[in-house]
Amino acid sequence: MVGEPKIQNHGATAAMAGAPALSEAESETPAAQPPPALLGGVEQSGSLLIANPGAPGLSEAKQSVADPFFSGRKHLPALDGLRGAAIFLVLLCHYRDEFGAFGRIGHALAHVFGWGWVGVDLFFVLSGFLITGILYDCKGQESYFKNFYARRFLRIFPLYYGFLALFLLGLIVYRFGFPQDFSGSAVGRALWRYQPWLWTYTFNFRCALHGNTGLVVSQFWTLSIEEQFYLFWPLTVFLLPRGKLIYACVGIGVGSLVLRLIAAGAGASAMAIYTATPFQLDALATGSLLAMLVRGPVALGRIDV
């Protein structure tokens, strides 16, 4: 559903191969260091780089390395653990009814595992965190939009549309090769009606309007929300500085929650509230907000707007 963050390693190099040896006197004399402002607003403390937000000439991209947790990291293993936990929760939710055969305890477990749907929300939080981190770290680089969308295309489109093409081919053979069987198959007809929604990444709205039948393609509603998020979020990150982007995340999250409460009060179905994009933006915004809070001037320091 989502890509891994690519954060460049900016660790300091202690020595360079081939450098001329210093004399004993020179080696004992500490070299004069320029003031922090001459280093582009970056002070060196031990092996960590600590940004000075007030220094001139320090761009947002350079300030983003201020957090030692992210400086020099290309992969965060803890996120793999969260992703695994989300997968486990979703599986428990899907198979919770199987526990009903184990009597009273099984029914109790099935009720508890019914809360596994929060694993989907956790996926959206992780997606918002990773995608926003990638976009923010690439701000100011050439071909910002081209590189992002090219990576998304290569990561998702070949596998997704390859599956849909094979699936559609099977449906075509089924419909026109065995017309009587197809006309009597509610599943086959439903899958045929789903095709426009699936090919346009709008299947979540189909689920919101008509319900999710639980067929083999039912899980693609989450991917639809991801792709719709990619349509407007890269431009948002590109246009807004860190402070305004934080406010945007908070506003989107609160607005999505309010919309969900209004829809529930108006009698909208649980499926509509769960699968329509406006009602799921709070999870994506939460992840995006976390990505901004762990980056930026001195971690959770002041917000410049």
Image (tube, grey):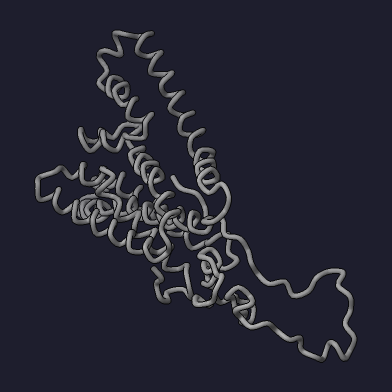
Q: What residue is drawn where x is 42% and y is 64%?
A: 242
x, y percent for residue 275: 26, 43
Q: Is residue 34 left or right of residue 171?
A: right
Give the answer, above or below, for where 186 lies relative to 212: above
Which quadrant would residue 94 be assigned to in this image?
Answer: top left
Residue 83, located in which quarter of the rendered image? bottom left
How far across and down, in percent of the image, does residue 301 sit?
42, 76
Image-based side of 31 in relation to 95, left or right: right
Where is residue 1 drawn, in percent x and y?
43, 44
Q: Residue furthest left?
A: 266
> Can residue 158 be seen from the camera position used here?
yes
Q: Nearer the viewer, residue 66 or 165?
A: 66
Residue 206 image position (x, y, % from top left): 26, 33
Q: Which residue is depicted at the point 24% across and 49% down?
A: 279
Counting labels gives: 0
Up/down of 184 relative to 277, above or below = above
